[in-house]
Amino acid sequence: MLRFFSFLGRHKKVVVLAGAISLSSWMLSLGEHEKFKMATAVSTSILQVGQRGFSWSIRLVHLQREHEELRRKAAELSLEISQLREAKEENERLRELLEFEERSHFELLPAKVIGWGTDRTVNSIVINVGQRKGVEKNMPVITPAGLVGKVYRAMPFVSVVQLLLDPNCRVSALVQRSRTSGILGWERGDRCFLNNVPIRGDVREGDVLVTSGMGGVFPKGLLLGHVSQISGDEWRLFKEIRVIPAVDFARLEEVFVLIYEDLEKSSADGRGAVDTIDAR
C-alpha cells in the first residue's frame, strides 16, 4: 500500500492525465440520454452543496441574532436583579429607620444624603430637607447607629450637615458604664479621641460613649462610639483614648434631623457650653 501511494506521488501528473483521458473516453461513449442524466446529477449535486452552504450561512446569521438577543435579555435580567437587591436593602434600611423613629422620644425629620459638602473648611454632607421643612441651624442629625453631626447651614430646600469627623468638632461625652466625662473630638483618620479624661479616670477598652447633654446642643444619651485603645503614662495628667465612631460615615444614605425643642432652654439653664461643632 505504501508503495502504491509512493508511486502515485511520484507520477501524479501522469495519473491525473490518464484519469482525465479515461473519463473523457467514457463520456464520449455515452449516449445523449446518459450524458443528460450525468449533467443533471452533477448540476443537482452542485446546487445541493450551494444550497446547504447558503442555508448554513442563514442559520449562522439567525444564531448570531439569537445570541445577541439572549445577551440583551441576560443584561436586562442582571440589571433587574441588581435593582431588586438595592430596593430590598433600601426597604430594610427604611424599616430600621421607621422602627427607630417609633422608639425615639423626639420629633425626627427623615432626610436623604444627596452629596458631600463643597466647603473645604468643613467636613460635611448635604441633605434634601431645609428651612421649608422646619430645619434650622444647630439641629442635631442622627441615624439609628448614633450621632452624625449637626446642621451647619440651613437653606430653603437643602441643608449642610457638619459631621462628627470635623476638626472643629467638640462634643461633651460620657462613658456609659462609669459615667466618666470627657470631650470627644476628631483629629485624624476615621477615629476620634476622648480628651480631658484624668489619668486615673475609669475608662476601659470597649466602653460605650454617649452624649452627656451638657451645652444644650445635643440631647443626652445619643450614641457616639466605643473606646478602642487607651494609652498614657502615669506622669501625664490625662489619658489618650481612641474612639471608633458608632456611625459609618462612608456609608451614609438616610439620616434624621432631630427636632429638639429644649435646646435653647438647656443652654439658658447654664449646663455648660461644651457641645459645639463649629468653634470658629
Image (spheres, rainbow, N blue to C red):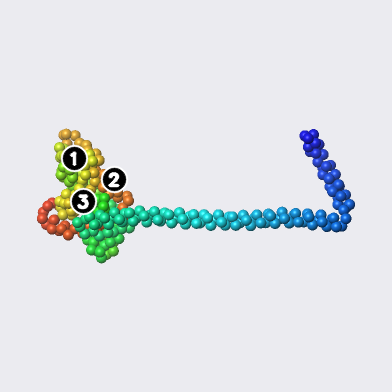
Numbered tag placed on residue 222 in the rendering: 3
At label 1, which amino acid type do we have? Val
Which residue is denoted by mark 2 in the rendering? Answer: 190
Closer to the N terminus: mark 1 or mark 3? 1
Query: Left or right: 221 with respect to 47?
Result: left
Q: Are marks 1 and 3 in contact (CB under 8 Å)?
A: no
Separation (CA) of disc 2 from disc 3: 19 Å
Q: Which residue corresponds to the image point at 13% horizontal and 58% vertical from the top-left?
A: 265
Could you say where residue 246 lies in the image, as x and y percent from the top left? 26, 47
> Is 222 situated above or below 158?
above
Q: Which residue corresponds to the image point at 49% horizontal and 54% vertical from the top-left?
A: 74
Front residue of this view, candidates 151 and 146: 146
Q: Indicate the secondary structure of the residue bearing disc 1.
A: loop
Closer to the N terminus: mark 2 or mark 3? 2
Could you say where residue 132 lies in the image, as x and y percent from the top left? 25, 65
Could you say where residue 215 lies in the image, as x and y percent from the top left? 15, 52
Numbered tag placed on residue 203 in the rendering: 1
> Is 229 situated above or below 124?
above
Could you say where residue 207 lies in the image, as x and y percent from the top left? 21, 42
Crowding near the residue tagged with mark 3, few <14, some 14–19, many ≥20 C-alpha atoms within 10 Å: many
Crowding near the residue tagged with mark 1, few <14, some 14–19, many ≥20 C-alpha atoms within 10 Å: many
Query: Left or right: 122 with respect to 72?
Result: left
Crowding near the residue tagged with mark 2, few <14, some 14–19, many ≥20 C-alpha atoms within 10 Å: few
Closer to the N terminus: mark 2 or mark 1? 2
At label 3, which amino acid type do we have? Leu
Residue 76 in view of the camera = yes
Separation (CA) of disc 1 from disc 3: 18 Å
At label 2, which amino acid type do we have? Asp
Q: Are marks 2 and 1 in contact (CB under 8 Å)?
A: no
